[in-house]
Amino acid sequence: MNKTAWRFFLLFIIFCSCAAVYSQNQKISAVSVSQNFIDADEFLGYDSFGYSYLIKNNVFRKTKGTETWEYKNVSLGNITKVDLQNPLKIVLFYEDFNSVILLDNQLNKITEINFSQNPIPITVAAIGMSAQNQLWIYNTLNQQISLFDYLKNEYKTVSTPLIDNIKYYQTDFNTFYWIDQKNNWFSCNIFGKITTLGKIADFDKIEFINDHQYIFSKSDMLYFTDNSRTNSTAVLGIENLEKTFDKFYYKDQILSIFTAKEILNYKIVTP
């Protein structure tokens, strides 16, 4: 290798090393905007009207300032999952009893559904609010994603059977998202079309933002990920956060961290 080529090679190595260091240090800054002390076992999130939702001693609560509503149903055991997409029709899932309660905005019961009494056998492992008076359901008996019309009591499968078990899931009105045991990320729309969205990094907790972005925690650190990117900015650490937390929640560029005693809200702007 002549002197010119050797010099070019050294410059290339230095450039790559600097780029690697830079990419590893890229982060998203979080700016603290509010802090609220609470008495709860679990923080569930906020709605667009500014109400917060909590669980304390298996009692579901909705609060804002001095306003508080509660709902409890000891006969159905522990609350497994809460869907807050529609604050006028809140979904409480009680997996041990294969049942769902729908609540109005003052936490009055609208309806109760016991899937064990359905003419078509259903054992629910995942559920969420969908569009047009329907609920998303993952039925473990046939391993298919389905839709259940809770006004007409009509049940229909929309997907083919899933190959692997669901490790994590999240829904919106039009889409059922899930991660399988191999950390593959998929989506299913209301017509049953399944799309592979990519591979998910190893995580402790996770929340999808859309069909290519998500926030996840690992070893008490939070990260923002964009699966549509292939460069070094695909995974960015989020800094200036509380170091120990039980859960996080993201909505409208506000990241909420739930600790044992308080909710810490941060403003972050995803790339």
Image (cartoon, helix red, strand yellow):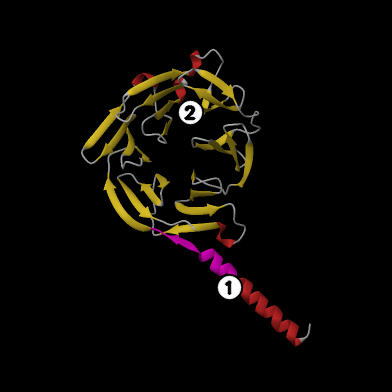
Which is more N-terminal, label 2 or label 1?
1
Task: Name the spot of residue 22 as percent of width and height, x first.
Answer: 54, 69
Report which residue position mark 2 lands on.
132
- Residue at 61% across / 61% down in the picture? 231
In the rendered structure, does residue 28 fall within the stretch colored magenta? yes
Considering every residue shown, the one lying at the far front of the view is: 132
Q: Quadrant of the N terminus?
A: bottom right
Q: Is residue 11 above or below residue 24?
A: below
Considering depth in this image, is 50 or 38 the residue closer to the camera?
50
Which portion, as a residue range, is magenta?
Answer: 19-30
Residue that numbered label 1 is attached to? 18
- Against 181, residue 6 (above or below) is below
For badge 2, the amino acid type reads: Gln
Query: Is residue 45 rendered to the left or right of residue 228?
Result: left
CA gap, disc 1 to disc 2?
A: 53 Å
Q: Position of residue 75 (x, y in %)?
A: 36, 18
Q: Which element carries disc 1, helix, strand or loop?
A: helix
Query: Who's the residue at 35% across and 42% down the image?
Result: 48
Q: Amino acid at mark 1?
A: Cys
